[in-house]
Every structure is written in C-alpha cells, then in structure tokens.
Amino acid sequence: MEGTSDLALELAAGALMAIPNLVANMQPMGVGIAIKMDAESIAKLLQCTASVLNLKGQMDMHDAQRAARKGSMIRQLQERRLQANTAGWEIRKIDKDLDVQRVRLALAESEIRAQQQHVERVQEVQEWHRTKYTNAALYSCLENSFRTLYHKAFLLTMQLARKAERSFQFEMASRFGSSNNMSFLAPGGYWDSARDGLLSSNNLYLGLKRLELAYMEKRAYDYEISKNISLRQVDPAALFSLRQTGTASFSLSEVLFDMDFPGHYFRRIKSVGISIPAIVGPYTGLNCIMSLTEHRTGVTPQTASASEPYTYKGRDDVRFQTDTIPVSSIAVSHGTSDSGTFELNFCGERYLPFEGSGCCSKWKLEFPTAHKQFDYNTISDVILHVRYTAVEGGIPMREAANTSVKEYLAAVSSTEVSIVGPTALLDLKNDFPNDWYSLIDGAAVNKLRLSGLAERLPFFTRGRQCMIKRAVAYICKKDIASEGVGITLLDPKSYVFEPPADLTVQVPEGVEVLLIKEMNCDVRVNWELECMILMYNVPRNLLYKVVLDSVAAEK
C-alpha cells in the first residue's frame, strides 16, 4: 500500500508542477505578508512526502523482507526441527525396526540352521531308511505275514472252538439226544476272505456265547452210580488165564448193569479203579497195564419190540455209538482202588482215564511176563470199581430191560440153548485148603469133595434148582509128562461124567496145561450142590483148578 501511496503522491506532484505559481501579497500598511501559492512547492512537498513514504515503504519493505526472511528462517527452523524430530522418531523407529529385523534375522538364521540341521537329519534318515533292513519291501512282507498269521491264529481259534463244541456234544449228548441239535458254530466257519476276516472274531465270540448259554441251560443231574465188579464172578476163565499167562481179556455186558438198574441208558464211565488181591513181598508193586479195547453207549431210550429188539444188534445198531476217549489205558502200580492217577480228582481240568466210555465194554489186563515180580497164581480176584453216570429211560425201557434179563437167565438155564452162561471158578488149593491138604497127603488115588458150591454161586441162583451144564478141569504143569495122569468128575452119587469122544477142548490163550478134562454134564443137583473129583497118577506138587462153566439155574 505504501508503494501505491508514494506513487500517487508522485503523480500528484507531477500534476501540480503543471499548475502555474500564484503569489499573494498582503501589505496593508506596507507591512504585511506576501503569500506565494505555487504548485511547485506543493509538488515538492508531495514529492518529499512521496519520498518519505517511499523511504518508509522501502524501510518497511526491508523490514518486511527481513521479517519474511526471519519468518522464513523461523519456518525453516521449525521445519528443520520438525524434520529433525521426525527424523529422530524415524531414526528411533528405524532403530526399533533394525532391532526387529536383527531379531528376525537371528530367527531366520536360526531357522536356516534348523532347516539345515533338519535337512541333514532328513538326509541321515533317508540314508538310514535306504540302507536299513526294514524297508518298504519288508513292511509289505510283514503285512502279508501278519495277514497270514492272523488267518492261521483265527483258524487255530476256530479249531479250539470246534473242540469245545465237540466236548459239549460229548458231555451233553444225554440232554440233547442228537448231535444235530448241538451245533452252535457255523459249519463253514466265519472267515470272510473278501474282507480279510473282518468281524470274524466277533461272530466266533457270539457262537461261543451261544454254546455257553446252551451249557448253562442244559446242565442237569445224571445218576451217579458206583459198582464193584469181580472178575472171578464175571469171567473166571479170564482170571484163570491171568494167573497162568499174566494176560486176561474180559467184557462187561449190558445185562450186568440192567440187573442193578433196569431202565437206565446212556451209561458212561466216569472213572475205573482196580483192586488186585494177591500175595506180594514188601515194597513190591502190582504192576500191570489195563486197557479198554472196545466200548459202546446206548444213546436213546430203547423199547423192546419185534422189529427192534432190546439187546445190541451189532455195529449197524444206530441206538448205540462208540466215542473216542482221551485215555484208554492206565498203568496199575499199587493195585488197591488204583485209578491210574496220583489223585482221583473229579473236578480237574483233564478227562480222567476211561472217562466218557460206555459201560458195555471189553478190557484187557496185562502183567509183565519177562520178569515177574511175584507169583501170579496168588491173585485171588480182580475187582473193578466202576463209577459211571446214567440217565433214566422211563418205564417202557425198564420193562424191556427186565424182560431182557429174564430172557438171558432163561436162555442160560435151558439145556436146549447153547449159550455161555455164568461161570464159577474153583481153585482147589485156595478155596478148599483143608480138603486139598488131605488130598495131597493121602494115597495115590484120591477123591476131593467140593462141598458148599451153592454158596459160591451168584445170589440170583438162590432158591432155584441148579444144574452143572459143563465142567472143565485143568492140571497145569508144563514139566510133567501126561502119560498115566487122569481126572474124573463125579457127582455125590458117584455118577461119572464121561467126556464125549469128539469133544474139542479149547485152551485159554497162553495157558500151558498138562491135562484138560471136559465133561458135558447137564446134571441137575440139589440145593447143596456138590461134586467130587477123582484123580489118579497125579503128582502131589501139581496145582489143580476146576472151572464149572455155565452154571445154570432154574426155578
């Protein structure tokens, strides 16, 4: 504005310079004043004023410039300070960023080292996997092997399950009647080859649980029976053979058990003990082997009819079956209720000897013959202690069993039927010691009276008319000549039982005899059954035995 003002004054002064000068004298009394009004003075004044204003403007401009420079400097200073502060903050931020980057760098370096170490380890692992024994091929082989082992283990488990099922069928057959009703496992098994046996074990476990449930539901009580059987009463010829040869074979028939409990079936042995009364020395054992050679079990209630007889018809008889038993032979050592075990435990995990076999059976008893430990002739009897179980067959079967026993006794009592019946063994030396002593101490020709024979016969013969159908006398001594040695069997009335001319005498297997005299008697005697033996030219040191075979009895 000041520059504009002085310029205006300059313009005004220039304009006034164009105006002429005016002089006014005022001297009334000669004294006065002269007033000169010229434009030049005013112009000069204006010029002076303009110069002053110009100078002031220049001074103000200078001050303004200085102020502007100062402000600019101050602004620049502030800007520099701001920039310095900003730069300082940026430096601090950069320092922090540097610290962060240093940390990141350290982390990156550590990660690089870790990666390098990892790479080294991976290389080592790779090298180890490349050179180790357990490679991919081995794992493939292991996979196939484990699959095969699992399959074989399952098959083994299946076999054990089948054995458990067969044991169940064997032990519980009396409750189910037929093995077809006792199948709880799938006939084809449970293995699914398409799925590598998936859930096979679960299905097998379910089948075993069904088997366990059936066992718990069908557990029942069977008759438990003990029976003592004397070999001397059942088969004296076998006892005679045992004394002479050390070996005896005998059988236990169905009639023997029907006499005790008619109407029972499914008779199966639980245990068998044996007692052998004999004269042995101290610390001497009655060592022998007892074996079960044959047996059968009646598995269904039997009824007597014309088309289906009660008795056993042969191997094709479907009413009887023969099961394979685990133990069919025992070693007898002490001979007193000897069961062939150290301790007879009916609650043990193993099957007992002969357990599960049928009571209708055939047996064989063998003593060592090469080196005898005692004199087998001192064996007075062999007693079997049979413990067995049975199932009630009902009234029809009981009546059929009683009828069968009656028919058997009637058959052996008949003189027209050729059937081997009950037999009595008479050991003259041991059963008639007084008469025997009198005999061997007498003359050359002797008579030995066998009295009280009725008391030695089975109880069922009491009250019946007895008859001797056949008698066999044995003189056993292999080192004595048979010339001139004779034996005759007499009844109390001195009736001589002469043997038929065409009679063929069957010697027990292995028995060495000097003389066998057999007579078909068919002679009825009174209740005081007696007979006499007439012997001549017989050395006194011989052992005499008489077997009264087929001792029949009638009402």
Image (tube, rainbow, N blue to C red):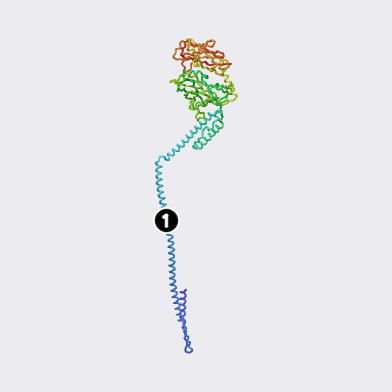
Q: In this view of the protein, which residue sits in the foreground, 509 or 55?
A: 509
Local packing at callout 1 (Cα closer than 10 Å; few below 14, some 14-19, many 20+) is: few
| Number of marks in the rendered image | 1
Q: Residue at x 43, y 69 (%)?
A: 70
Q: Is 275 situated above or below 121?
A: above
Quadrant of the rendered image containing residue 51 = bottom left
As rendered, which of 8 and 60 lies closer to the eye?
A: 60
Which of the pair 552/199 is nearer the observer?
Answer: 552
Residue extending furthest toward the bottom: 29
Q: Residue at x 41, y 52 (%)?
A: 106
On the image, the x and y values in percent for residue 435 come to: 50, 13
Residue 422 locus on image (x, y percent): 54, 18
Q: Does any portion of residue 504 appear in the rendered image?
A: no
Q: Quadrant of the C terminus?
A: top right
The image quadrant of residue 317 is top right
Task: Residue 328 in the image: state x and y as whole percent.
Answer: 49, 25
252 lies left or right of 108: right
SS of the residue under disc 1 = helix
Residue 448 visible, this angle: yes
Q: Of 477 and 108, which appears nearest the observer?
A: 477
Q: Left or right: 372 with respect to 227?
A: left
Query: In the image as oriented, which residue stretches furthest toward the right?
Result: 395
Q: Badge 1 is on which residue? A: 99
**Amino acid type of disc 1?**
Asp
